[in-house]
Image: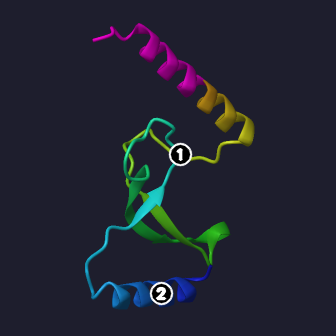
Amino acid sequence: MTATELRDLLNSIIEQTAGRDLEVAIPVFNPNAIGPRARVGVEAVDLGFDWDMGKLFLRPAIKPGESLRVITAEERKQIMKQSREALEQQLKDRPLL
């Protein structure tokens, strides 16, 4: 996607939502999330320079020391397995009412 395509899509969305000020967010993987999709906000938009010339970057609003990264299918599978096992253990340890 180019910056021009992004601008056009944003303009269209703003028109469709009657100019309502929407939060900009990046969906993230969180197997324990309940409710709305897990996400992080966008803190800033940066122009690339040097090797990144011609790029536009959305900077995620995350805590210092944290980062977003791509996980492999195998990592995702392992995380889901661990999450499922933790939930099963919690249900097993839960006293019956």
Residue 60 occupies quadrant: bottom left
Q: Amino acid at mark 1?
A: Phe
Instruction: Please name the predominant secondary structure of the magenta segment in the image.
Output: helix
**Label 2: which secondary element:** helix
Magenta highlight on residue 34: no
- Asked which colour scheme the image uses, the reply is rainbow
Q: Measured from the top left, where is residue 74 in percent x and y?
A: 74, 35
Q: Identify the residue at horizontal 46%, vertical 11% (top origin).
A: 92
Q: Identify the residue at horizontal 53%, vertical 45% (top origin).
A: 29
Q: Identify the residue at horizontal 25%, vertical 80% (top origin).
A: 20
Q: Measured from the top left, where is residue 39 in percent x and y?
A: 42, 53
Q: Measured from the top left, where is residue 70 in percent x and y?
A: 64, 48
Q: Mark 1 or mark 2, which is nearer the start of the sequence?
A: 2
Magenta highlight on residue 86: yes
Q: Relative to 8, does residue 20 appear above or below in the rendering?
A: above
Quadrant of the drawing holding the C terminus? top left
The residue to which callout 2 is attached is 7
The residue range painted magenta reads 82-97
Mark seen at residue 96:
none
Residue 13 occupies quadrant: bottom left
**Label 1: which secondary element:** loop
Which residue is nearer to you in this view: 30 or 26?
30
Which residue is nearer to you in this view: 82 or 42?
82
The residue to which callout 1 is attached is 29
Q: Amino acid at mark 2?
A: Arg
Q: Relative to 87, does residue 31 appear above or below in the rendering?
A: below
